[in-house]
Image (cartoon, rainbow, N blue to C red):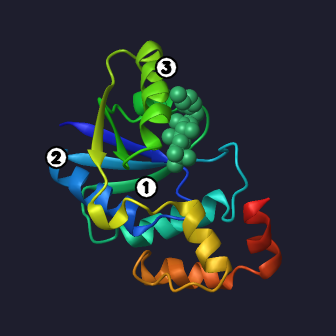
Amino acid sequence: MTVAIYPGSFDPITNGHLDITARAAKLFEKLIIGIYDTPAKYLLFTTEERVDLARQAVANLPNVEVESFTGLAVDFAKEVKARVMVRGLRMGGDFEREFNMAMLNKKLFPELELVCLMASMEYQFLSSSLLKEAARLGGKIDNLVPRHVAAALSSKGSEQMGRIIE
Ligand code: PNS
């Protein structure tokens, strides 16, 4: 059985992430979304909230699981016996960062293969940080995230939302 991980911050999970998830779930027998607990950025949602939002979002995909992880993504891959790491790529800025991460991950765990899926056209511009900024400024985000994520975003107070762009 080929197990793949799809690691990220998922703060929060968006329709762009879900597009990658649904496509990757067709390629591998099991896909585990790995939610990194301490990315070096301000987080709007706690690890538990990010896991919960992601779990609700993938409830319709039977071969997809959601777990949080601490430490290196490659160690998480080893722990869950994954042979593949999935990442989504948008046009432009993503490539250099992804390439650097891929090279380091390859050094750390040479047997792990990276599979990058190109983001679909409608999500090329979508990132969790732009989404949070749009939500904070009252933009219409309902076609960018599942309904429960939109509700979770609107439940955050203006003080927390204000810190996103600090
Ligand atoms: O959604 P993001 O923020 O682009 O995801 C980045 C993530 C979580 C995949 C990356 O920061 C990561 O793998 N973090 C875990 C720690 C680690 O393995 N660092 C070395 C990466 S080369």
Q: Is residue 141 left or right of residue 123?
A: right
- Residue 44: percent from left, percent from top: 69, 65
Q: The residue under label 2 is which amino acid type?
A: Leu
Quadrant in which the N terminus appears: top left
Q: Position of residue 69 (x, y in %)?
A: 55, 42
Instruction: Indicate the position of residue 106 as horizontal and vertical percent values.
Output: 40, 18
Res. 66 mark:
1
- In the structure shown, which secondary structural element does the residue marked by tag 2 occupy? helix
Badge 3 residue CB within 8 Å of ligand 1: yes
Residue at x 67% of width, y 84% of height: 155
Callout 3 secondary element: helix
Q: Closest to the observer: 65 or 119? A: 119
Q: Which residue is mark 2?
A: 27
Q: Residue at x 70, y 49 (%)?
A: 41
Mark 2 or 3, nearer chain start: 2
Element carrying mark 1: strand
Numbered tag placed on residue 36 in the rendering: none
Q: Is residue 166 above or below residue 148?
A: above
Q: Earlier in the sequence, mark 1 or mark 2?
A: 2
Question: Quarter-wise, where is residue 16 in the image?
Answer: bottom left
- Whether ligand 1 has any atom under 8 Å from the Cβ at mark 1 is answered as no
- Cα–Cα gap, marks 1 and 3: 24 Å
Task: State which quadrant residue 86 falls in.
Answer: top left
- Sooner in the amino-acid sequence: mark 1 or mark 3: 1
Viewer-side label of 1, 3: 3
Q: Quadrant of the C terminus?
A: bottom right
